[in-house]
Amino acid sequence: MVTEMKDYTPNIEVQKENILNVNNLEIFYGEKRAVNGISMDIEENTITALIGPSGCGKSTFLRSINRMNDLIPGAFAKGEIIYEGLNILSNNINVGALRKEIGMVFQKPNPFPKSIYENITHALKFSGLKKKSQLNEIVEESLTKAALWDEVKDRLHESALSLSGGQQQRLCIARTIAMKPTVMLLDEPSSALDPISNAKVEELIVELKNDYSIVIVTHNMQQASRISDKTAFFLNGDLVEFDQTEKIFTNPSVKKTEEYISGRFG
Amino acid sequence: MNAKVADRVATGVFIVIAFIIVSVLIGLFSFILYHGFQHVSLKFLTTPSSNMSAGGGIRDQLFNSFYVLFITMLITVPLGVGGGVYMAEYARPGRITNIIRSCIEVLASLPSIVIGLFGLLMFVTLTGWGYTILGGALALTVFNLPVMVRVTEDAIHSVPRDLKEASLALGITHWHTIKTILLPSAFPTILTGGILAAGRVFGEAAALLFTAGLSTPRLDYTDWNPFSQISPLNIFRPAETLAVHIWSINTQGLIPDVDAVSNGSAAVLILSVLLFNLLARWIGSLIHKKVTATK
Ligand SMILES: Nc1ncnc2c1ncn2[C@@H]1O[C@H](COP(=O)(O)OP(=O)(O)O)[C@@H](O)[C@H]1O
Ligand SMILES: [Mg+2]
C-alpha cells in the first residue's frame, strides 16, 4: 500500500484558510440601513449557512458579496469585504471578473430561455471561449458535477424551460460551476422546489463543498443543520451569532439564537 | 343577482361584443375584397396608372408602398429599438426621464396631417429635396418612432428581472446582457409593435401627401442603380403610394373608372397588409424558435 502512504494526511482538524473577511459591513437602501456593521470570516471549502427570520438582511448581505446590489438604485455599502487581498466593495473593482469568481444561484430557478447547452455556454462564450470541443467538454463536466448530465445528455439542444423545476435549478448551479468560481452564493436555492428535488439539490451542495466555498441563505433550519459546517444567525440586520453549526443548534451562546432555533419566533 | 348569474351575464356580454367585432371585421373585409377583386387582374397590377383615361393600373403605387415601408422601417426600427433600450435600461428613473416619456407620448398622438405639414417644412422645403421617398419615410418615422420606442421599452421591462440578474451574476456585461438575453426575450413583443407600425405606414395618406408627393416619375424596372433618376430604388424621387393614390383619384376624379381603380386598390392594399403581417409573424416565430430552442 505504498501509494496510499503517499497520500496520507494526519487526521487532525486542519484550520481552513479564510476566503472572505467581512469587516464592519453596513448596507443601505437609500436612508434605510438593512445590514448593521457585521464582521465575519468565511472559510474555504466550507458551507456557511445564513439563517434568520425573513427581512433580517440575509439576501442583502449575500448579494453584496458579488456586488448584485449595484443593480438596485440607491443601494450602497460601507465597510470591507476582503477577497484575495482586495476590498471588493471599492469602486475600482472589475465587477464582471469578480462575479465570475463569486458565482450566485437564486431562489427561483432562472434558466435562460435558450437550450440547455446554451445556458452553460452563454457566459463561457462571452468570456472568449470559442472552441467547440472545449465548450462541449465544459458542458459535460459542469452538468456532471451538478448531477444533471445523465438526465439531459440526450436533449442538450432542447429548451431549458422544458426541464422540471429541480432540474432547472441544477442547471443554474451547473452554469455557475462552468465559470470555475471559487465561491458560490446560494440564496434559498431549494425553497421553491418539491421535497425530492430539494433533497437532490442539498446532496449536490454538500458534494460541491470539496471544490468551492459555499455561502447559503436558508429559511429552513433543518437544512442548515443538515448541510452546513458553520451557521450565522441574523436578526434585524445584526449578526447575532456565528459559530460551528453543531454548536449553534445544540448549545448556542446567545439567548435570541436559542429562541429562534427552537421556533419561538420567526 | 348572485355570482353565478353575474358570471353568465358577463360571459354573454363578452360573447356578444366579440361577435360584433368579428362580424364587422368580416363584413368590411368581404365588402372590400368582393368589390375590389372584380377589378384586380395581373394587368391591373402590372400597368402604370393613368391620369386621364380609363384602364390604368397600380404598378408603381404598389411598388412605392412597399418601398416607402421598407425605407421607413430601415430608419424606424434601429432608432426605435435603440431609444427603447435606452429608456428601459440606461435612463435614470426621475424627472427628466418622465419628461422624455411624456414627449414621446405626445409625439405618438399627433394627427398625421400635422406631421405631414411638419414634413413639408422640414424634409421638402428646408432641405430643398422636393417631394421624395426619403422625405416621406422621415415623416412616417416621426410618428412611428414613438410607438416603436414605447413598445420596445415595455417589452424589455416585461422580461423577468431574474433573467437579467442571472446573466449579470455570471460576469456578463450590461450591454451583452441586453443583446443576448433581454432583446431576444423581448423580440416577439417588439415584432408585434413593428408590424403595427408597418400597418400604419401602408395605410397612411395624410402624412405622405406633402412629403412623398402625388406623382411618380416614369420608372424603368430594369434599372437597379439607386442613384439613377428613373430607377425605382432612387430615394430622392417623388412616390405616390397606394393609399395616397386612392385618395387622389377620388378627389381629382379625372379618370372615368375611379370606382373600379379605387376598389381594386383598396383590395390590394388590404391584402398586402395581411400578407405582410402573416409573413412577418411567420419569420419572427422562426427566429424566436431558433433563439429560444423551442419547437
Ligand atoms: N430593493 C430594496 N429596496 C429597499 N429595501 C429593501 C430592498 N431589498 C430589501 N430591502 C429591505 O432590506 C431588509 C432586508 O431584506 P432582505 O435582505 O431581502 O432580507 P432576507 O433575505 O433576510 O429576507 C428588509 O427590511 C427589506 O425590506
Ligand atoms: Mg431573502
Image: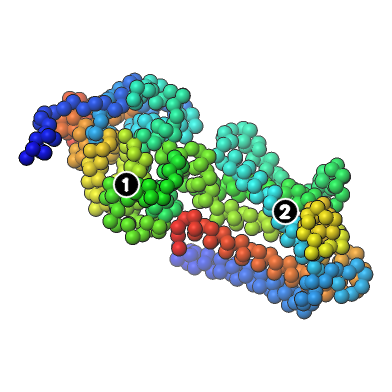
Q: How far apart are marks 1 and 2 (CA)?
A: 47 Å
The quarter of the picture where the C terminus of chain B appears is bottom left
Specify the amino acid type for callout 2. Answer: Ile
Quick one: SS at disc 1? helix
* Closer-to-camera residue (A198/A256): A198
Q: Residue A142 carries which label?
A: 1
Residue A99's quadrant in the figure?
Answer: top left
Specify the amino acid type for callout 1. Answer: Ser
Q: Residue B107 carries which label?
A: none
Q: In this view, does A266 lie above or below B184?
A: above
Residue at point 16% right, 27% down?
Answer: A14
> Can residue B242 be seen in the rendering of this structure?
no
Q: Residue pushed farthest front?
A: A2
Residue B151, percent from left and from top: 60, 49
| Left or right, residue B175 beside residue A120 | right
Quick one: SS at disc 2? helix
Residue at point 30% right, 53% down?
Answer: A149
CB of residue at label 1: within 8 Å of ligand 2?
Answer: no
CB of residue at label 2: within 8 Å of ligand 1?
Answer: no
Identify the subunit bearing mark 2.
B
| Left or right, residue A123 beside residue B87 | left
Residue at point 63% right, 63% down?
Answer: B277
Residue A19, percent from left and from top: 29, 28
